[in-house]
Image (cartoon, grey):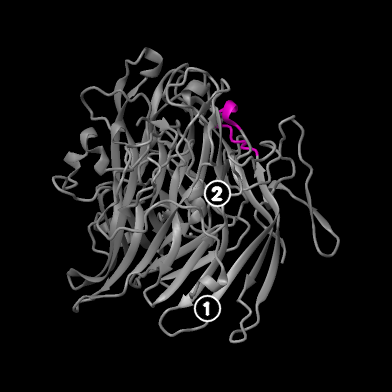
Amino acid sequence: MDAPKSTAARAPATKPQSGSAAKPAAPQAPQMLAAQDIAIALEPGPKGSSGDYTATPLLPSASWQAGANAANFTYGYTVEVPNGIAGAGPGISLGYDSSSVDGRTASTNAQAGLFGEGWEWSPGSISRSYKACKDAGIKDSGDECWAGDILSLNLAGHAGQIVRDDTSCVYRLQGDDGTTIERLTGQRNSAWKGEGFKVTTTDGTQYYFGSNRLPGGDGTDPEAKSVSTVPVYFNSGQDKCLGAQTPANGTWQQLGWQWNLDYVVDPHQNLVSYRYEQEDNYYGRGGGQNNGTGTSTKYQRGSYPTWIGYGQRLPDQIAAKGTAKPAAQVWLRGAERCFASGAITCDPAQRTKANAKSWPDTPVDQECAATGQCLNLSPTYFSTKRINQIDTEVLAGTDYRRVDSYVLNQSFPPPGDGTSPTLWLDSIVRKASNGQAEKALPAVSFEWLQIANRVDGVVRRPDGTDASAPRYYRPRIQKITTETGGLITIAYKAPECSRVKGTMPSSEDGNTMACMPVKWYLPGQSYPDPVNDWFNKIVVQSVTQQDMVAGQVTTVTDYEYGGGVAWHRNDSEFTDPKARTWDQFRGYATVTTRTGNGNAAEAPRTKSVATYLRGMDGDVLANGTKRSVSVPDAQGGTIKDEEVLSGRVRQT
C-alpha cells in the first residue's frame, strides 16, 4: 500500500559490513551464461534518487522456479516446524523473487525486508491505502487523508485487492473465491473504533487481523501488538458506508494502515497465535500546512513478527486468559540492521545521525522522539530491525525443548555507485538439537551480483536540463550452494535499454522493451513537475544446475521471451496525476523454455512454449483512446485480453 512518498540516498559505503564473509565485489553488467562455461545440478531525507520512505512497505528445504512471463527467478527456503497435536501448524517459507528487486525505484520504498533484499515472509496482513493530503486539497501538507476504504489482503492462497460494495457495504476479494471478509469494530487495539477484520475461507477457517486479544476473550490475555496506525485527516465528507460515523471534515483520527494476522481458528477450534513488535515513531503532524509548526504525534513506522504458538485450542486459551502453554512455538529473533565494529556495538542507543553509516539502509534522519525538535513533517515507513534467527520448540513436560535453529547470516554488500548498501542474506544454517548435541547442516549460501536498476545516462529535469543520478545498483542472487552440495547458477540478460547508446522506447505508452518509465520529484526542487526517468526490468536468461558431489549430468534451462513486454498504465487513484505513466509490468506474450543441453549422456532436450494473457485490452493510451487487444491460439481462435485474465496461460 502507498502512503506519502519518500526516501533518501544514505551515506556512501565503501566496504561491506557484516557478520559473515565478504562477497564478490564491484558491480558489473549481467553476464550471459554459456552452457560450456558452467557446470551445475540442482531470484538523506524522506525522498531522493534512491527511493521514497513515505511509501509504505506493503516471498525441499528449498525450491527454485523461473521462466514465467515475469522473466524472474524465485527460490523458496522452507523452515520446518514440529507437527502440532491440535490442528495444522504455521507454514514458514522464506521466498526470494528477483522481480521484487526490479520494483525498487526512485518512487518506491527503498528498504529491503526483514530477511534481506528480495526475500519476504509474513504470516499475513490487511492494509489500507490513504491519500497524501497535499493531493487531496491541503496545500503543502505532509499528512495522510482518507480516500475511501481501499484495502488489500495478503494471505497465502487468498491475496489481492478487497472490493467494497458501496451499496451493501459488503467486502469481497477481487476475483471472488468464496472468501468472506468482515470489518470488525470494538477490537481491543489502538486503531480508531477498534477496527479489525475477520476473513473466513470456504473450509470454515477464520483468520483474525488486528483482533489484538483472543477472539471471544475478556481482553486480559497478552496482546498481539498486531495493528500499525497513522494519523489520518478527513476532508471529503461522509463515507458511503461509515455514514454519520465519518469524522468531521478537518479532524483526524489514528487509523490503522496495517492489520497483521494474529489468530487462526479452524472449524474444530484449534488455534494458531501470532505476536508482533511495533516500531513507533513521531512526526510533526500538520506542520506542512502551518509553516513548519506541527504537533509531535505517534504512529507506527513498521512491525515484525516475533512469536507463533500452535498445538492449542481457543476455548482452553480463553479459560486460561491466554497463559496456557501451546504444544509448540516458533521464535523469530530480531536484531538491529547493523553489525558491530569497533566502538559500535549496535545498541539501539547508538542509532544516531552521527552513527548513521553503521545502519546503512536505515533512514536514521527520519527518526523522531516523543519530545524535542522534529523536522519531519510526514510519516515515513521503515524498520531498524532484521530477523537473524528462527527457533522452533516443543513443550516437554512443563518446559520447552529446542528442536531446530535457523541462523540467517547477513551483510551489507557495497553497491559501488556511491549509494548506501542494502541488507543481503548471505546464508542460512540449520542447527538441529531436539534435546541432543547440536548438529549443524552445511549452509545454503547465496552469492550476489550487483545490477543497475536505473537505465544508464542522465536524468532529464522538467526545465529541460540534465541531472546526473546514481545507477542504483541492487544485488540479485547469482549462485546458490545448497546444503547437499548442489550448485545453482542464474544468468541474467544484459539490460535492453540504454540512454547512452540510444536504444530506448519510442514512447511511454508504446513501450515494449525491458525498462519502465518512472516519474519522481527531486529533493527540494522548485518546479512543480516530476523528472522523467527510466529503470531496467532485469530478465532471467538461464538457470544451470550441477551436482558437485555425485557428478550427475549438468542441467541447463534456457528461456526465450517473445512478443515484447506489456506495460499497463498505472490507474491507481492514489497516483499523482503528474507522475501517472505506463509502469505496470504485465510480462511477455510468450515464453519458450528449453531444458537440457543435448549431450548424449542425458535425456533429450525438451522444449515448451507458453502463451500468456496480460490484461491489456482497454488500457488507456496517451491520446485518451483505449487499446483493443486479443490473443490468438494455435487452433485459429482468439480471446479478448481482458484485465481479469491477466497472468493466465492461454495455451502451452
Element assignment for label 2: strand
Asked if 67 appears above or below 416 in the picture, the reply is below
Q: Earlier in the sequence, mark 1 or mark 2?
A: 2
Q: Magenta residues, as a range?
A: 569-580
Residue 623, horizontal then vertical, whole percent: 74, 29
The answer to whether 568 appears left or right of 26 in the picture is right
The three-letter code of the residue at mark 1 reads: Thr
The answer to whether 159 appears left or right of 14 in the picture is right
Q: Which residue is mark 2?
A: 160
The three-letter code of the residue at mark 2 reads: Gly
Q: Which residue occupies the foreground of this view, 210 or 116?
A: 116
Position of the C terminus by quadrant: bottom right
Element assignment for label 1: loop
Instruction: Mark 1 vs mark 2: give the one in front.
Output: 1
Q: Is the C-beta separation of discs 1 and 2 under 8 Å?
A: no
Q: Residue at x 38, y 78 (%)?
A: 484
Checking the image for residue 554, the label placed there is 1
Magenta segment's dominant SS is loop
Quadrant assignment, res 314: bottom left
